[in-house]
Image (cartoon, grey):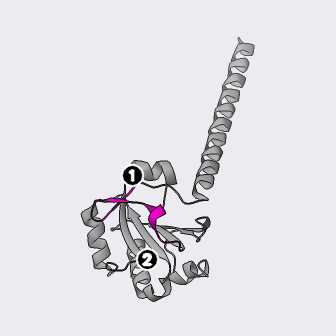
Amino acid sequence: MRDLMIWVLIMTVLCIIGWMANASFARLQQKKARTTSLSTFPALNLLSQDSLGFRLESLPLEPVLLIHFNSGCDHCQYEAAAIKASTDKFIGVQLVFFSTEPITVIRQFSEQYGLTGYSNIHFTKINATDAAATLGTLAVPHIFIYGIDRKLVMEFRGETKPEAILKYLQ
């Protein structure tokens, strides 16, 4: 009886170790796939403020900032205000803000921070499922910087000063 209990205990421990190793391997594979998919311009299904499809591929051949935001996020609000104060430094750069919030909320946010009317600043909506499938779990704000060659230059998680972003656009 004692031998049987030891054998069951050993098998249970081995099963738990196997399950944990498999889960870790799956997470590593997922992270590797995300890194690979984001190393070049992601194919995102975005909607512009007028609810029309917005294609990243149609942007001018300039560096691109993809900025994930949420209107209720204090850090996102700081980011928007800081970018507004530095718009003259972002000439020749396309800024694409994207959120899973309703278009009306996105429009209010862009107007509140004075970021409408710029030809290089775009506010878009993304479906939450599409965002998670393509980009994984994102912080807010979350900034991706892509160069003219459409390759990922830098990724920032959280609030980032414009000066830090501009270093990667030189």
The reply to whether the magenta stretch includes residue 78 is no
Answer with mark 2 or mark 1, whichever residue precedes in sequence.
2
Amino acid type shown at disc 2: Glu
Seen at 67% across and 41% down, the residue is 25
Hey, which residue is sitting farthest right in the picture?
A: 3
Q: Identify the magenta region.
A: 46-62
Q: Quadrant of residue 27?
A: top right
Dot label at residue 128: 1
Specify few, some or many for label 1: CA neighbours under 10 Å numbering under 14, 14-19, or 20 or more.
Answer: few
Q: Residue 148 in the image: state x and y as whole percent.
A: 58, 71
Local SS, label 2: helix
Is 133 drawn above or below residue 72 in the view shown? above
In this picture, residue 76 sits left or right of residue 43: left
Give the quarter of the figure containing the N terminus.
top right
Seen at 40% across and 64% down, the residue is 98
**Residue 140 seen by the camera:** no
Is 137 drawn above or below residue 67 in the view shown? above
Is 148 drawn above or below residue 167 in the view shown? above
Q: Find disc 2 in the rendering and name its residue.
A: 79
Dot label at residue 148: none
Q: Residue 39 in the image: state x and y as whole percent.
A: 61, 59
- Marks 1 and 2: in contact by CB < 8 Å? no
